[in-house]
Amino acid sequence: MGFVTRLRVGLRAARHAFPFTVRGLGVLTLSIMAVWIWGFGEIDLLLLALGATGVAAVALATLLVGLGTLRLRRNLRRLSAHSPTPKRLETGGWIPTGLSLPDWRAIPWIDLDVYWEEPVGAEARLVPRDGILSEEVRPRQRWLRTTAVRRFVVRDVFGLTALSLRDERALGSWVLPAVGRLRETPIVTALTGADGISWPSGTPEGDRMEIRRYVPGDSARDVMWNVYAKTRKLHVRLRERAVDPSRRLVAYLVAGKGDEASAAAARVALQTGGLGDEWTFGADGTPGSQCEPGPALEAVARSGGFRGSCGLERFLDEVDLGDDAACVVFVPPRLDPWLGEVARVMSRRSGRVAVVIGVDRLQPLRPQRAAWQRFAFEVPAEPGEIPEEVHEVARSLAAHAAAPPLLVVRATGRSQPLTGRELAQEAA
């Protein structure tokens, strides 16, 4: 550990042990100046009384915060080293973690807050319930960790003093990305050509002979409108299973910035059986491959925050794609170093790999109006524009893909192949 690192750690520890906040230090300094300079020096009784009151307030706040910190330390020591926590969490919502502390209403003018230092990307709070303070956490990104590092901060209600305690204990839970409205999105069905648009490098498949109920994401080309006219229920035609044989599916999740929606699409495919009966799954941050839903979902959670090199090529070498296997890669919508690695791997296996790009929502479209109309009227935002960065990612991967890159939107649950004019020009 270098000198700069040791100095930084020492300053951070001193900051947490220093009892006065910036406001409290300012009030204490002004109060001492009022007492010493104007109170005793100028014999100003008003400033003397105000300064003495300020010094007494800071001293009382320091005493109460110190007592609260000692009580908090005693309560944390009494807690079990393995606090009860749910096995599986989900991003986006407040979830109880099982950690509870006695209520602090016995000590006046004191507040208690909690922050999570590790894993990062989690917001925590203490909620009073039946005389105790129950901790709730709202993860903002997925993770799989064995320990949690919390920072408890004891402060007075006036913000004059504050002390903090660091607590590290076992964490028996892991966080998966929220699926939003992707629960009913037929990801693999869309990849196999549910829109009826052929792809030059794809394989010929059977005619649409079977029928099932319509689900969001199906193409309007496959809707049986004559049945809808009679029953008022939407049905779509599927390919004949005897003509379109089932193939082993290999799926991989590439981790990167903004990959929560792509990870949610991979989770949906794993939990709903969208990968078929025989599949193999891999993800960045987890060596090897998984063939069961439980370990595969753990690999999805473990990939959160991974910033190492992409392991797609190593994964494909291990699973050994045969003639009967197809590969689906879930990628982030950002232009990062992983893009060049994935494009190189796909070029070596041209026509064997399909791509799924996940986004949280599309950019709003605003109609063009005159300046006076924009000033006088509120223009509603209409979702629908695909970000240009997503187009760049799709153009980089479409040339060697087995099908048009599939875009899935977590907020709406819609999916659409990116087969626009830009991709056609790039493929040409």
Image: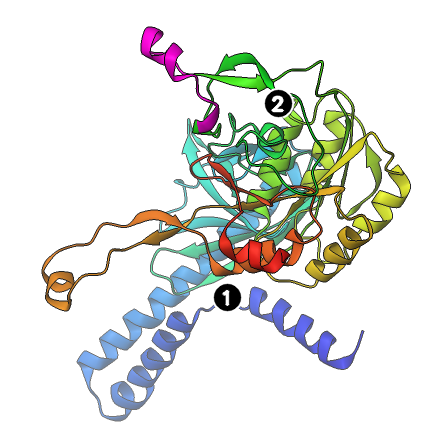
**Residue drawn at x 64%, y 15% as measured from the top left:** 240
| Contact flag, marks 1 and 2 (Cβ < 8 Å) | no
Q: Is residue 54 left or right of residue 363?
A: left
Above or below: residue 304 compared with residue 42: above
Start and end of the magenta stretch? 221-234
Please tell me which residue lies in front, 185 or 60: 185
Tally of numbered tags: 2
Q: Earlier in the sequence, mark 1 or mark 2?
A: 1
How far across and down, in percent of the image, does residue 129 sit?
42, 29
Q: Residue furthest bottom?
A: 41
How far across and down, in percent of the image, does residue 133 sit?
47, 36
The secondary element bearing badge 1 is classed as loop
Residue beneath label 1, please?
A: 19
Q: Which quarter of the picture shows residue 54? A: bottom left
Q: Which quarter of the picture shows residue 104? A: top left
Q: Which marked residue is nearer to the observer: mark 1 or mark 2?
A: 2
Name the image colouring: rainbow
Q: Is residue 127 left or right of residue 302?
A: left
Residue type highlighted by circle 2: Thr
In the picture, the disc for residue 146 is none
Q: Which quarter of the picture shows residue 353? A: top right
Does residue 193 belong to the magenta stretch? Answer: no
Does residue 225 belong to the magenta stretch? Answer: yes
Residue type highlighted by circle 1: Pro
Residue beneath label 2, please?
A: 272
